[in-house]
Image: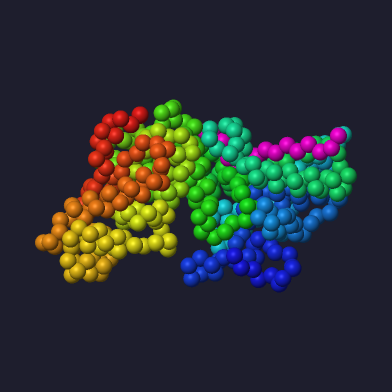
Amino acid sequence: MTTKNPPHSIEYANEQFIVCGAKKMRCGFTTGSAAAMASKAAVHFLLTGERLKTVQIMTPKRLFARADVIYPPITQSEPNRFRCGIVKDAGDDPDATDGCTIFATVELIVGENGVAVAIDGAKGVGRVTKSGLDQAVGNAAINSVPRKMIENEIRSECKTYGFSGKAIVTIDIPNGEEIAKKTFNAQLGIIGGLSVIGTTGIVEPMSEKALVDALEAEIKVIAAESPSPRSIIVTPGEYGLSFLSAFAPQLTQIPVVKCSNFIGSALDLIAAQGFSHVLISGHAGKFVKLAGGIFSTHSRTADCRLELLAAHAALSGAHRETVAAIMDCATVDAALSVLDCACEVQTETVLQSLLTKIEDHLDRRISGAFKWTFLMFTNVRGILCHSKNLFDFINEMPF
């Protein structure tokens, strides 16, 4: 991450940049940071009568977040209750919540013996309906780190201005229910609005951590809803899901996690949740890379499909001209067509060579954490190769 701030100056999260590919992209702050800033501004007004124009907080990333404060029109005067908001700034990340306003209403009740903070959600903040998430079923979908951030800001203001008693904080997002339709909340069992989330307080554009965190949440929900022993299917996306449904309709009864490029992370998270049977199925465009021990398959990380196919073709007896032709191909299907035309080597032999190496790498990664089987296909050719135990494994999987 780079910063435009001079040395020793305050570094604001939403003024930082990361380089993603050839682009310089601005960071932002999370919904959790927005809720904490809104809470701080509201309690500050109740304790001092001052309307802050801007507010800033320290995020868990040890960078400040700051934003202008939104003050809605006051329709009723309540001396112990106040509401204000912060517009979420996701920087250059394509975040569905970018630009939405997160409001915090704070009510203070004078008491003794320090400060107690209660946090809940209202309109536009989702409710948890499934086990396995950060919050218990029935709670507002305000995760533990944002809750701690809100509580810290409330306690700090109360300590500064000598308040003792109870602070009741209610977070609302006026258009949160509509925005949530663009997210995976419903699939995760978060109903009625958005989640207030963020473990670092800042948004890094195209953050792999955010994607893996979402994957972890989904796997935890599946684990919590599945009786033991648990089965799951891992596939990168819709291609794999559609193929499996046609290949073995009974598999539609097994939970599926679409892991995108994070195959290794998905397997690690599944192991941590105690699944017993895992079917790993995907398109060769990604899964050929597993033969090289590459478990994060985005082309920006590694795009060695043709090199691996060429290497295994050479190991299987392909001539130099065949290997060179494979290297000139643009897709796995095109490379397999080159092998089909080669008289000195069988396509099936090359695929079995690849499969052996893929299974070696999977075996090391999984390390006995669960039983597994493997299937690789293309849309053009259908099944390319699979583990010897595939059909017995499918019959054995607990439904």
Residue located at (41% from left, 58% from top):
298
Query: Between residues 164 and 83, which one lies in front from this camera angle?
Result: 164
Query: Between residues 223 and 76, which one lies in front from this camera angle?
Result: 223
Residue 200 placement (x, y as % from top left) = 63, 52
Please indicate, yes or no, whether residue 291 appears anywhere in the rendered image: yes
Does the stretch in magenta take in 120? yes
* Residue 395, picture quadrant: top left
Residue located at (24% from left, 53% from top):
353
Tell me the quarter of the image containing the C terminus: top left
Q: How is the image coloured?
A: rainbow
- Name the magenta segment's main secondary structure: strand
Residue located at (78% from left, 39% from top):
167
Count the numbered circles shown: 0
Does the stretch in magenta take in 379? no
Q: Is residue 151 left or right of residue 356?
A: right
Q: Which residues are magenta?
A: 113-130
Residue 288 placement (x, y as % from top left) = 31, 55
Q: Is residue 301 left or right of residue 335?
A: right
Eyeballing the image, is 49 above or below 230? below
Query: Between residues 158 and 292, which one lies in front from this camera angle?
Result: 292
Q: Is residue 360 left or right of residue 385?
A: right
Residue located at (35% from left, 29% from top):
398
Residue 264 placement (x, y as % from top left) = 43, 49
Please indicate, yes or no, whether residue 184 appears anywhere in the rendered image: no
Query: Between residues 394 and 343, which one lies in front from this camera angle?
Result: 343
Tell me the quarter of the image containing the N terminus: bottom right
* Residue 270, picture quadrant: top left
